[in-house]
Amino acid sequence: MPSITQRTDWYGTAKSDAINGSDGNNILYENAGNDVLTAGGGDGVSVLIGGDGRDWLVAGSQSDTFRYTAESDSYYDSTGGHNDLIVGFDPAHDMLDLTTLGLDGIGFGYGRKVDRVYNEVLDRTYLRSYDHDYIPGVDLKYFQVALQGDYRTTLTDDNFWNLEARDRFDDSLTGTDEGQETLFGDLGRAVLHRCHGGLRWVPLHGPRDQGVGT
């Protein structure tokens, strides 16, 4: 995340909270409860990280990233939707980071892509994944998040952090200078090279994975 001012981290509690970011750089973490997170203004950037509960995430005047790391953060199952609502998302500069879930673009809900489903009555666009391993007797949670408004034509792959993944062997992964991506090292000894883009590296399997800035 580029930084031009000091970063402030905000943390929700187990209760329902309302957290407003500052004018600088912010990371806002949800916890349990039904929370309202509002990104800051000014010249900084904000990252809003989804957590448990049915939350509202409100974009600010900055370039904001909305990040999800587990299906249980925002989902639907056999009982209906239990998803967060993102308000004020601007496709011109806001981003979705679903890379920890293995999702990085728009498609038909399969193969690392999310489907776009518009509800005209609620004026909401739902982003859904249909991929999940079948587990007998388990009510599966499928990822779903809602955006207030009609984003069927304005939301594109450019609004998603890119996922670059490798297999269980020793890898060397290098980010690009074009936009934002996440590099995942799986089993084996992985070297993740950071370029000038807005990249974050995720060493999944401990100290054998290395992040290298370039």
Image: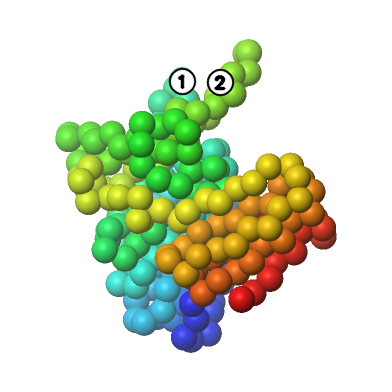
Q: Residue at x 23, y 34 (%)?
A: 119
Query: What's the residue type where badge 1 is placed?
Result: Ser
Q: Which quadrant of the rendered structure holds the C terminus?
A: bottom right
Q: Residue 89 occupies which quadrant of the picture? A: bottom left
Q: Is residue 76 above or below residue 38?
A: above
Instruction: Where is residue 20? Give x, y as percent.
Output: 42, 69
Which dot marks residue 139? 2
Which dot marks residue 93? none
User: Is residue 119 shown to the viewer in this render?
Assistant: yes
Q: Residue at x 67, y 62 (%)?
A: 192
Confirm or deny contact between disc 1 and disc 2 (CB under 8 A).
yes
Q: Residue at x 41, y 53 (%)?
A: 160
Instruction: Where is residue 79? Give x, y as percent.
Output: 44, 22
Instruction: Where is residue 133? Give x, y as percent.
Output: 59, 23
Q: Residue 212 occupies which quadrant of the picture? A: bottom right
Residue closer to the observer: 211 or 78: 211
Query: What's the residue type where badge 2 is placed?
Result: Asp
Q: Secondary structure at mark 2?
A: loop
Q: Is 65 on the left or on the right of 93, as rendered?
A: right
User: Is residue 53 shown to the viewer in this render?
Assistant: no
> What color scheme is it?
rainbow
Q: Is residue 195 above or below residue 136?
A: below
Q: Is 75 on the left or on the right of 205, as rendered?
A: left
Is tag 1's residue or tag 2's residue first in the polypeptide sequence? 1
Q: Residues within 10 Å of mark 2 (few under 14, many from 20)?
A: few
Residue under label 1: 78
Q: Is residue 51 above or below residue 144?
A: below
Q: Is residue 4 above or below residue 56?
A: below
Q: Residues within 10 Å of mark 1 (few under 14, many from 20)?
A: few
Tag count: 2
Instruction: Where is residue 39? Give x, y as percent.
Output: 39, 67
Residue closer to the observer: 136 or 166: 166
